Image: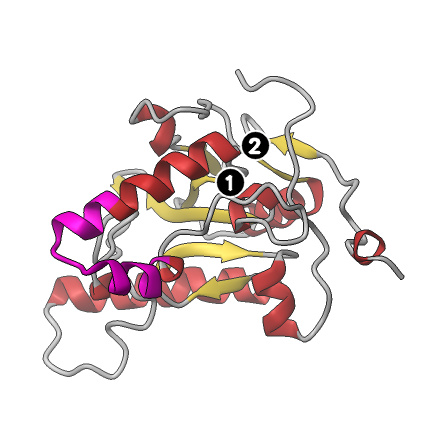
């Protein structure tokens, strides 16, 4: 069996998440930052989109999912990768430390469909929770590269502030909902989950469902 055949859902389309549920809001962070290759819409593989909608529809009354980033173009991935290197250099990281640690925070912008960046598959999602007053407390902003952004940062710690306790509970709640639906988490980013990509496959001892892909229609 070829590598392509092992990607059993590779032909599954990317679908728009716009207006798919009253329980889902889109906050296109990279588009709002005017990063190249972005859109004000958000796209996921059909099977991943169906799971996200199902999670949203079963949230308690007054809670919503906020989708921040899904499928990501190579142009966008390259820009984020390059900018992350710049940020690490400005923080005083050596080139050796950058090369060693950058993959923990952002994937190389590869076009190889069998070794893609997670978001290039359309199977990875960055998201958070909100209520009618705004986003729930998660302890850090989206795309924070400090240790506080690690999913389990608050676990096992004593003397947490009320804000930190709230962040811990909100992270636990989101993680429970996502993992119960079959998603795999990213330990260094509380907002990042995936279903069917290489990370998911490694965690589940199976083959990836999706490889890298391109939009077959233009983003809005």
Name the spot of residue 120 as percent of width and height, x first. Answer: 56, 42
* Percent coordinates x, y for residue 91 in the rendering: 13, 53
Whole-percent x and y of residue 143?
29, 48
Q: Is residue 47 visible?
A: yes
> At 79% across and 57% down in the image, what residue appears?
3
Q: Secondary structure at mark 2?
A: loop
Q: Could you tell me which quadrant the N terminus lies in?
A: bottom right
**Badge 1 density bin: few <14, some 14–19, many ≥20, Cα 10 Å:** many
- How far is mark 2 from mark 1, CA to CA? 9 Å
Cβ atoms at labels 2 and 1 below 8 Å apart: yes
92 relative to 172 in the view: left or right: left
Q: Earlier in the sequence, mark 2 or mark 1?
A: 2
The magenta segment is: 86-102
- In this view, the residue in front, 107 or 26, is 107
Count neighbours of disc 2 (C-alpha within 10 A) and say few if under 14, some if 14 to 19, many if 20 or more: many
**Which residue sits at x=68%, y=75%?**
205
Which image quarter: residue 115? bottom right
Q: SS class of the residue under badge 1?
A: loop
What residue is at 51 percent from the left and 35 percent from the top?
Answer: 74
Mark 2 = which residue?
17
The structure residue drawn at horizontal position 27% and vertical position 68%, both measured from the top left corner, is 168
Considering the whole magenta stretch, tell me its main secondary structure.
Answer: helix
Residue identified by numbered label 1: 70
Q: In the image, is residue 91 part of the stretch drawn in magenta?
A: yes
């Amino acid at each position: 069996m070829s590598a392509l055949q092992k990607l059993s859902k590779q032909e599954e389309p990317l679908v728009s998440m716009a207006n798919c549920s009253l329980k889902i809001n889109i906050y296109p962070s990279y588009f709002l930052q005017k990063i190249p290759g972005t859109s004000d819409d958000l796209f996921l593989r059909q099977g991943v989109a169906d799971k996200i909608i199902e999670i949203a529809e079963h949230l308690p009354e007054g809670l919503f999912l906020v989708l921040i980033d899904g499928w990501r173009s190579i142009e966008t991935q390259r820009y984020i990768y390059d900018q992350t290197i710049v940020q690490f250099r400005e923080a005083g990281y050596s080139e050796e430390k950058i090369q060693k640690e950058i993959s923990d925070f952002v994937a190389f912008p590869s076009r190889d469909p069998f070794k893609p960046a997670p978001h290039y598959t359309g199977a990875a999602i960055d998201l958070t929770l909100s209520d009618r007053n705004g986003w729930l407390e998660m302890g850090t902003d989206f795309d924070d590269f400090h240790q506080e952004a690690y999913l389990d940062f608050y676990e096992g710690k004593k003397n947490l502030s009320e804000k930190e306790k709230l962040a811990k509970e909100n992270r636990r709640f989101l993680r429970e909902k996502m993992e119960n639906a079959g998603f795999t988490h990213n330990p260094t980013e509380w907002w990042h989950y995936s279903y069917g990509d290489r990370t998911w496959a490694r965690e589940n001892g199976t083959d990836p469902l999706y490889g890298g892909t391109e939009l077959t229609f233009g983003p809005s």
